[in-house]
Image (cartoon, rainbow, N blue to C red):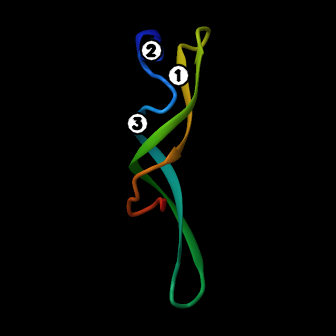
């Protein structure tokens, strides 16, 4: 993760897999939710590396639409 942190810059595009909670509404009006795995493409706005947890956090805006996430 440390090497990735040093390679990423603000303005880069990043594609990553994530899990999102998706809500669906049936014809009767009842609402259900499920968790789906999807791939997001982000334009990087901020990068943070947590050395204690060895986690990379990336903040950005979605630049590519998919079935679950709109632009």
Residue 12 position, x and y percent, is 43, 31
> Earlier along the polypeptide chain: callout 2 or callout 1?
2
Q: Furthest-front residue in view?
A: 11
Asked if the residue under mark 1 is in contact with the one under mark 2, i.e. CB atoms within 8 Å, the reply is yes
> Earlier along the polypeptide chain: callout 2 or callout 3?
2
Query: Mark 1: few, some, or many residues within 10 Å (few <14, many ≥20)?
Result: some
Occupied quadrant, residue 46: top right
Asked if the residue under mark 3 is in contact with the one under mark 2, i.e. CB atoms within 8 Å, the reply is no
Asked if the residue under mark 1 is in contact with the one under mark 3, i.e. CB atoms within 8 Å, the reply is no
User: Which residue bears the numbered disc 2?
Assistant: 1
Residue 19 position, x and y percent, is 47, 46
Q: Quadrant of the N terminus?
A: top left
Query: Mark 2: few, some, or many residues within 10 Å (few <14, many ≥20)?
Result: few
Mark number displayed over residue 13: 3
Instruction: Give whichever of 21, 65 is nearer the camera.
Output: 65
- Residue at 56 percent across and 90 percent down: it is 28
**Gap between marks 3 and 1 measured at Cα:** 15 Å
Mark 3 or 1, closer to the camera: 3
User: Which residue bears the numbered disc 1?
Assistant: 56
Mark 2 or 3, closer to the camera: 3
Q: Is residue 16 above or below residue 50?
A: below
**Gap between marks 2 and 3 measured at Cα:** 17 Å
Circle 3: element type? strand
Query: Mark 3: few, some, or many residues within 10 Å (few <14, many ≥20)?
Result: some
**Gap between marks 2 and 1 measured at Cα:** 6 Å
Circle 2: element type? loop
């Amino acid at each position: 993760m440390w090497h990735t942190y040093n390679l990423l810059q603000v303005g880069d595009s990043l594609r990553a897999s994530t899990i999102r909670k998706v809500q669906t509404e049936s014809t009767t009006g009842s609402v259900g939710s499920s968790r789906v795995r999807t791939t997001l493409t982000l334009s990087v706005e901020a990068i943070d590396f947590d050395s204690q947890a060895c986690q990379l956090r990336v903040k950005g805006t979605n630049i590519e639409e998919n079935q679950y996430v709109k632009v």
